[in-house]
Image (spheres, rainbow, N blue to C red):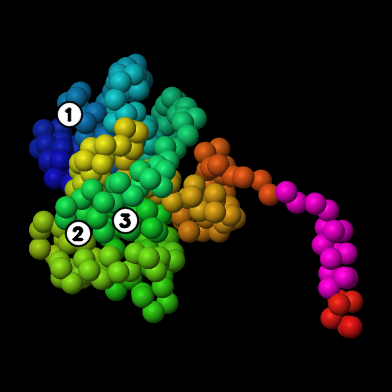
Amino acid sequence: MRITETILEKACTQVEGFAAAYQKLNEKVVLAGQSKSTLNNYARQLAHLCLHFGCLPEQLDDEQINGYLAALASGSKSPSLSSFKHSIYGLRFYFRLVGHPKRAINLPSLKKQDKLPVVLSHQELIRLFNAPELIKHRALLSLVYAAGLRAGEVCRLKIADIDSQRMTIFIRQSKGNKDRYVPLSPAILPLLRNYYTACKPVEWLFNGKEPGQPFSVRGLQWVMGETVKKARISKEVCVHSLRHSYATHLLEQGLDLVSIKERLGHAFIQTTMIYLHVAHIIPKLIGSPYDELLKKRRDDKQDKK
C-alpha cells in the first residue's frame, strides 16, 4: 500500500494538474460505486504514465500512448501484463472522465489469455499447510483454501464474520461490492480456535503490523511465497492458486457448477466453467431412467407384501 501512496504523492507534486485529476478520478469512482482497489489500480498506473512523460494523458498524442502501452505489453514478467491491463482500463476511464470518449475507444483492446489455473494436489496442500512455523500463517493459508477466498477477502475478515453457530463465513463488500456467505469448514474450526487463543486478534481476524489494521495482501503474498519454497512445491503458484484448488476439488467431489459459482462470488457462470478443463471428473455409469422406474416399482410391490 505504501508503494501506491508514494507513486501518487510523487505524481501529485511533480506533474502539474495531477492532484486535481486524481481528486476528480476519486470522486467519479466513488459515485460509480466501484471499489477502493479499482481506484488504486487506475490511479497507480496513471501516475506511472504521467511521471514517465511529465504531463497529463490528454497532453499526449496517440503515438506516445501506444508506444508506452506496447512497452508494458511486451514485458517478460507477469506484473507488466497486469500493469498493461490496469493502464488500459485506467486510461479508458480517465479519457471519458475528462470528456475525450473517442480516445478511450481508440485504445488497443485487451486479448484474453487462455491460461488454465494451476491446481495443487491434496498431497501438495498437506505439505503446504504443515510448512509454516507460525500458527497465524498456517491459519491464513488454510482458511483461503478451506473457504475458497480471494487474498483481499481473507485479509479483511473480522472476528465477528466467523459464525461457528451457523457454520458460515460472512464476506463483506468483495469484488463488485457484493456481500456473500460461504460455508465454514468444521475441520478448520479447531485450527482457528487455537490461533485465536495463541494470538488474541482484536477486531480483524488477522491483525496487520500496524495497530488497528488488517493483515496486508502483500504480507499474505510473501507468506505464500516463503511457504511454497519451504514445502518444496515446484509449481508456479500464488495465493489465488488455493482458491483455484478449492473450486476444482469441489467439482471433483461432485458439487454442481452453480453452487461453486455462488461460493466463489463469480458474477457469471462462464468464469466458473474454466474449472471443467482442469478437474479430473470420473464419469459415473448411468443407465436409462427407465431402470430406476422399474426398480421403484419392484420396491413398491415388496412394501405391499
According to the picture, the residue beneath numbered tag 2 turns out to be 135
**3D distance between C-alphas at marks 1 and 3:** 40 Å
Q: Secondary structure at mark 1?
A: helix
The quarter of the picture where residue 303 lies is bottom right
Q: Is residue 223 above or below residue 85?
A: below
Q: Horizontal and vertical percent for residue 6?
A: 12, 40
Q: In the shown orientation, is residue 271 left or right of residue 28?
A: right
Q: Which residue is found at the position 42% from the left and 43% from the top?
A: 121
Type of amino acid at the residue the image marks with label 2: Ile
The C terminus, quarter of image: bottom right
> Residue drawn 28% across and 65% down?
191
Three-letter residue code for mark 1: Leu
Residue 50 pos. (x, y %): 21, 30
Quarter location, residue 33: bottom left
Please check the rendered image and state whether residue 288 is part of the magenta-colored stretch, yes or no: yes
Q: Residue at x 40, y 42 (%)?
A: 120
In the rendered structure, find residue 51 and report the number of the disc placed on it: 1
Mark 1, Cα crowd under 10 Å, few <14 / some 14-19 / many 20+, is some
> Is residue 196 visible in this depiction of the protein?
yes
Task: Give the CA distance from mark 1 to mark 2.
Answer: 42 Å
Instruction: Give the percent coordinates (x, y) of residue 257.
Output: 58, 52
Badge 1 or badge 3: first in the primary sequence: 1
Please give the residue where the numbered disc 3 appears in the rendered image: 142
Sequence-wise first label, 1 or 2: 1
Point out residue 222 in the picture as x, y percentages from the top left corner. Answer: 20, 43
Indicate which disc, 3 or 2, sits on the residue closer to the N terminus.
2
User: Do labels 1 and 3 touch, CB within 8 Å?
Assistant: no
- For the record, the magenta segment spans 285-299
Considering the whole magenta stretch, tell me its main secondary structure. Answer: helix
